[in-house]
Image (tube, grey):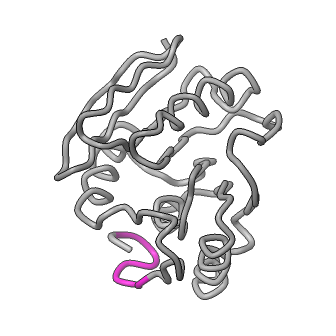
Amino acid sequence: MISGEWRGRKLLAPKNDATRPTADRTRETLFSMLASRVGSFDGLHVADLFAGSGALGIEALSRGAAHCLFGEQDRDAIDALRKNLATLGAAPRADVRAGSVLALGPAPRPFDLLLFDAPYGTGAGSVALDKLNRLGWVGADSLISIETADKEAVEVAGFAIDAIRKVGKAKLTLLRPA
């Protein structure tokens, strides 16, 4: 972890190569961008979608987020994610949804922060955001991050780009409801 309650703690990675972990430098850049916009993470409700080992959502929890919903379909990644949450004592503040992000149903309430780290080159982050927006996951003040390969475009109807940063082979796009 980069900052917060679990600063310096290492996370377990999935046993297979089906997921691509967000590089530490990319995660540090993302959370710097987010912190400059949200100020404090205290009390935020976060969704970490295409979660992998859960590094993004766990970073938000480490910084004070009240709760994080993790969406992931890869079995090895889910096992690593659950072990990471248990090791850190974060399980009571987490909800792990095993299955496709595109199969998630309506949200009980909008999330303050939605983090999408879909497989590069698929456009799945944009597709998922469009669908989840229609299912009540996004509120008027929600902040959204989509990580893609550096050459990928992010365009989702009803959302405006707040910022874009390239970090190595990754691109971070922050969006807000238009």
Which of these two is toward me, 54 or 60? 54
Q: Is residue 4 magenta?
A: yes
Which of these two is toward me, 75 or 9? 75
Q: Position of residue 49 (x, y in %)?
A: 59, 49
Residue at image x 25%, y 32%?
164
The vertical placement of 158 against 97, above or below, is above
For the image shown, how many numbered marks are present on the structure? 0
Residue at image x 41%, y 16%?
160
Q: Position of residue 29 (x, y in %)?
A: 25, 52
The vertical placement of 50 against 106, above or below, is below
Q: Is residue 54 magenta?
A: no
* 159 displayed left or right of 72: left
The vertical placement of 124 against 48, above or below, is above
Residue at image x 58%, y 38%?
112
Q: Position of residue 15 (x, y in %)?
A: 53, 82
The vertical placement of 110 against 2, above or below, is above
* Overall secondary structure of the magenta section: loop
Which of these two is toward me, 6 or 20? 20
Q: Position of residue 32 (x, y in %)?
A: 27, 50
Quarter location, residue 128: top right
Q: Which image quarter holds the N terminus? A: bottom left
* 148 displayed left or right of 151: right
Quarter location, residue 131: top right
Highlighted range, magenta: 3-10
Residue at image x 31%, y 41%?
172
